[in-house]
Image (tube, rainbow, N blue to C red):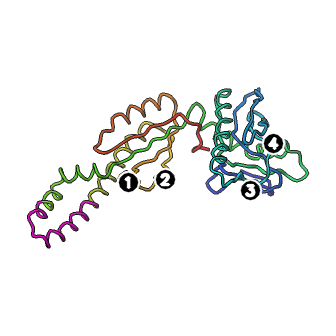
């Protein structure tokens, strides 16, 4: 998409998340809404009780407030949490009035053009990005975001493998029947084999569960998994964009997941942050 040479609008992935346009005064972006022919002007306060207003261009509008050019930043964790909650509240309020709302990530800021009115700078930005915004609004129309997380309790899975895997059982019997010195060495071999078997088991679970989920939804993103915590290994972290009927089907599929040591978390609906 062509753009003015003074603007740096997107990264190579085409994402509009975290965009900063390199010009002086800032406009903080909450979300873009599909307004049609009319705009319901919101009455709400945003981050640090800033006045939130709408800037409309054609059939879309961006909810914004005037801000400094740099991102919001603080060493006070509570303050940052309050900022994020305020950001989300503005988006939730917009979603209660409009059917199609596309949220921006926290700290998405457009900087104003020197000598240009604040509204004109943002309209220029929307105009430049209009086609991309409309395409993304088309993707999320009638849909919400749902999060699926699948965890494996490694202790439970390891015990299950020790009781069911022939090779592991045979090696355990050999350990039990060996002299102390040899048993020590055999235990190391057993632990190595168990670790490999557990990794293979986890990979097989991921493949099976992933395959069953993606058959029910058209739009999804595989997110990074968190590092293991205690005995919990995250197998899958999935952001799903789904209509109501797809969500119901997805819920039915998840209810059928019954593997020893596997826990499934299904949350939503959320604003479609992952699909901005």
What's the residue at 46%, 53% (across, down)? 226
> Which comes before the other along the chain, label 4 or label 3?
3
Q: What element carries label 4?
A: helix
Marks 1/3 in contact by CB < 8 Å: the verdict is no
Q: Nearer the viewer, mark 1 or mark 4?
A: 1
* Up-down relation of residue 261 to residue 174 (above or below): above
Left or right: 34, with 57 as reference point? left
Viewed as shown, does residue 262 lie left or right of 176? right
Q: What stretch is highlighted in magenta?
A: 173-195
Which mark's residue is nearer the viewer, 1 or 2? 1
Contact between labelled residues 2 and 3, with CB atoms less than 8 Å apart: no
Label 1 and label 2: CA atoms lie apart by: 18 Å
Q: Position of residue 174 (x, y in %)?
A: 11, 64
Magenta: main secondary structure: helix
* Residue 233 magenta-highlighted: no
Q: Name the residue under label 3.
A: 8
Residue at the spot 55% in from the left edge and 34% down from the top edge: 144
Front position in the image: 116 or 86: 86
Q: Residue at x 33, y 52 (%)?
A: 202
Earlier-in-chain disc, 1 versus 3: 3
- Mark 4, residue position: 123
Q: Residue at x 78, y 34 (%)?
A: 58
Q: Earlier in the sequence, mark 4 or mark 2?
A: 4
Residue carrying label 2: 224
Percent x, y for residue 140? 59, 36
Chain-order first, disc 1 or disc 2:
2
**Sequence-wise first label, 1 or 4:** 4
User: Does the rendering let one see residue 57?
Assistant: no
Q: Name the residue under label 1.
A: 230
User: Height in image: 19 above or below 215?
Assistant: below
């Amino acid at each position: 998409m062509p753009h003015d040479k003074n603007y740096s609008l997107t990264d190579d992935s085409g994402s509009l998340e975290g965009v900063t346009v390199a010009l002086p005064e800032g406009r903080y972006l909450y979300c873009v809404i599909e307004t049609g022919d009319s705009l319901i002007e919101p009455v709400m306060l945003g981050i640090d009780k800033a006045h939130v207003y709408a800037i409309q261009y054609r059939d879309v509008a961006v909810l914004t407030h005037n801000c400094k050019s740099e991102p919001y930043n603080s060493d006070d964790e509570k303050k940052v949490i309050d900022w994020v909650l305020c950001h989300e509240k503005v988006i939730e309020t917009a979603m209660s009035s409009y059917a199609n709302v596309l949220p921006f990530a926290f700290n998405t800021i457009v900087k104003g053009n020197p000598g240009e009115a604040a509204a004109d700078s943002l309209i220029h930005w929307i105009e430049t990005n209009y086609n991309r915004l409309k395409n993304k609004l088309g993707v999320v129309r009638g849909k919400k975001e749902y999060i699926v997380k699948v965890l494996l309790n490694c202790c439970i899975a390891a015990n299950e493998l020790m009781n069911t895997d022939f090779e592991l059982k045979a090696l355990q019997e050999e350990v039990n029947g060996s002299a102390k010195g040899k048993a020590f060495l055999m235990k190391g071999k057993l632990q190595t084999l168990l670790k490999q078997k557990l990794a293979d088991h986890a990979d097989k679970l991921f493949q099976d569960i992933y395959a069953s989920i993606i058959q029910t939804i058209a739009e999804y993103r595989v997110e990074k998994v968190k590092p293991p915590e205690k005995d919990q290994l995250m197998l899958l972290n999935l952001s799903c964009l789904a209509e109501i009927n797809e969500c119901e089907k997805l819920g039915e599929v998840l209810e059928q997941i019954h593997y020893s040591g596997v826990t499934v978390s299904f949350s939503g609906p959320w604003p479609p942050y992952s699909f901005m």
